[in-house]
């Protein structure tokens, strides 16, 4: 019973520690007390052995994944261009996303988008028009 309670308390402590730290926290420490209870914190405990854990927070800036395209795809596109053929840019997933975005933007209501700090900002009419044009361009290219 005590071990279950200690584990739950440890989990709650971890969630609290991770929730209260900033997104750019460098390290979380994990240690076990003399009674077998597991604890987590942003500072190592005094006089006890602890394990440093590096939180994974994802990318902080946009990442270009285009270099992950296979060499075969690149060679096929180059061969088509060399033969005077237009390289196929059809992308069903991108097409579906652009159509969904266009529908949302065209509804006429307020549209919000996330900012870099995790909050949201609402688009004004000029921004919505630009996003509609961008979505239509992607549909023309990808569908």
Image (cartoon, rainbow, N blue to C red):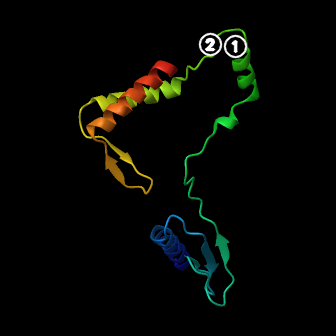
Q: Residues within 10 Å of mark 2 (few under 14, many from 20)?
A: few
> What residue is rendered at 53% in x and 77% in y?
6
Q: Residue at x 66, y 86 (%)?
A: 48
The image shows residue 103, relative to residue 17, as above or below, that is above
Please indicate whether residue 101 sits to the left or right of residue 31 in the image.
Answer: left
User: Mark 2 or mark 1, which is nearer the start of the sequence?
Assistant: 1
Query: In the shown orientation, is residue 132 left or right of residue 140?
Result: left
Q: Secondary structure at mark 2?
A: loop
- The reply to whether discs 1 and 2 touch (Cβ–Cβ < 8 Å) is yes
In front here: 96 or 82? Answer: 82
Front residue (pair 98, 81): 81
Tell me where residue 129 sits by quadrant: top left
Give the image location of residue 11, x and y in percent.
52, 70
Residue under label 2, please give it. Answer: 86
Q: From this viewpoint, which residue is outermost toward the left? A: 109
Residue at 45% over, 53% down: 116
Residue 13 visible (yes or no): yes
Q: Is residue 18 left or right of residue 75?
A: left
């Amino acid at each position: 019973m005590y071990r279950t309670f200690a584990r739950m308390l440890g989990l709650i402590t971890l969630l609290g520690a991770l929730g209260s730290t900033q997104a750019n926290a460098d390290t979380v420490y994990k240690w076990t007390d003399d009674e077998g209870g597991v604890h987590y914190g942003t500072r190592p405990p005094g006089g006890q052995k602890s394990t440093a854990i590096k939180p994974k927070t994802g990318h902080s800036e946009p990442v270009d994944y285009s270099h992950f395209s296979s060499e075969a795809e690149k060679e096929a596109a180059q061969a088509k261009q060399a033969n005077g053929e237009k390289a196929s840019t059809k992308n069903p997933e991108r097409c579906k996303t652009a159509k969904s975005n266009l529908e949302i933007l065209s509804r006429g209501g307020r549209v919000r988008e996330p900012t870099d700090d995790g909050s949201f900002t609402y688009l004004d009419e000029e921004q919505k028009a630009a996003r509609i044009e961008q979505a239509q361009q992607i549909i023309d290219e990808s569908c």
